[in-house]
């Protein structure tokens, strides 16, 4: 991450804002995965599926630790709280986070079969589109020889 610390200071203001915002966004998304997958898992009766979901919960927690490691290592200490709260202060990110969290919350508040299906779709949407769209930014930076350690972390998360 040493190179990333140097690269971070050399990013353009727009690149730094994108880096901070996307990292904040991904941190929030994995935190809601960690909290909400157990609700979905409670309705699963097949032991092999339940085990896979337990593994997903574990993986989401590790992903969140990876984002925290990046924030705590790369971003100057006086800017870290800003990054953690970025998703709350940026309207676009806040709306996206509230949308996906709202889909999960429907099932938590009213565990009907319909809301269960919606929460499963939220999981697929989050995993299949939201995360990968966030990862692409870091891969783009790495393709320009910037932030290689961050890209490596995302490659591990992808696996």
Image (cartoon, helix red, strand yellow):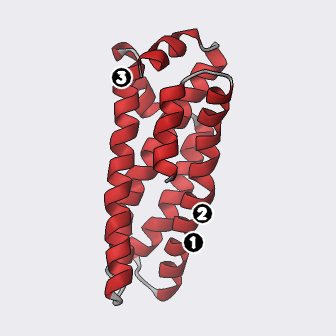
| 43 vs 159: above or below | below
Q: Residues within 10 Å of mark 1 (few under 14, many from 20)?
A: some
Q: Nearer the viewer, mark 1 or mark 3?
A: 3
SS type, badge 2? helix
Q: How crowded is mark 2: few (under 14 residues within 10 Å), some or many (20 or more)?
A: few
Give the camera-side residue of 31 and 104.
Answer: 31
Res 125 label? 2
Q: Name the residue under label 1.
A: 121
Q: Mark 3 points at which residue?
A: 73
The image quadrant that residue 60 belongs to is bottom left
Name the residue located 53 percent from the left edge and 80 percent from the top edge. Answer: 117
| 40 vs 31: above or below | below
Q: Residues within 10 Å of mark 3 (few under 14, many from 20)?
A: some
The answer to the question of whether label 3 and label 2 lie on touching residues, with beta carbons closer than 8 A, is no
| 62 vs 150: above or below | below
The answer to the question of whether label 1 and label 2 lie on touching residues, with beta carbons closer than 8 A, is yes
> Which mark sits nearer the N-terminus, 3 or 2?
3
**Quarter of the image that includes the N terminus:** top left
């Amino acid at each position: 991450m040493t190179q990333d610390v140097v690269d971070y200071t050399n990013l353009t203001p727009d690149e730094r804002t994108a880096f901070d915002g996307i990292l904040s966004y991904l941190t929030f998304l994995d935190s809601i995965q960690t909290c909400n997958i157990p609700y979905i898992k409670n309705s699963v009766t097949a032991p092999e599926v339940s085990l896979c979901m337990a593994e997903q919960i574990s993986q989401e927690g590790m992903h969140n630790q990876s984002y925290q490691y990046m924030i705590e290592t790369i971003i100057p200490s006086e800017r870290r709280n800003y990054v953690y709260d970025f998703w709350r202060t940026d309207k676009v990110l806040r709306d996206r986070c509230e949308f996906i969290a709202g889909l999960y919350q429907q099932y938590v508040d009213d565990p009907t079969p319909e809301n269960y299906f919606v929460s499963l779709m939220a999981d697929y949407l989050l995993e299949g589109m939201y995360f990968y769209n966030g990862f692409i930014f870091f891969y783009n930076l790495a393709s320009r020889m910037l932030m290689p350690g961050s890209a490596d972390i995302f490659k591990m998360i992808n696996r």
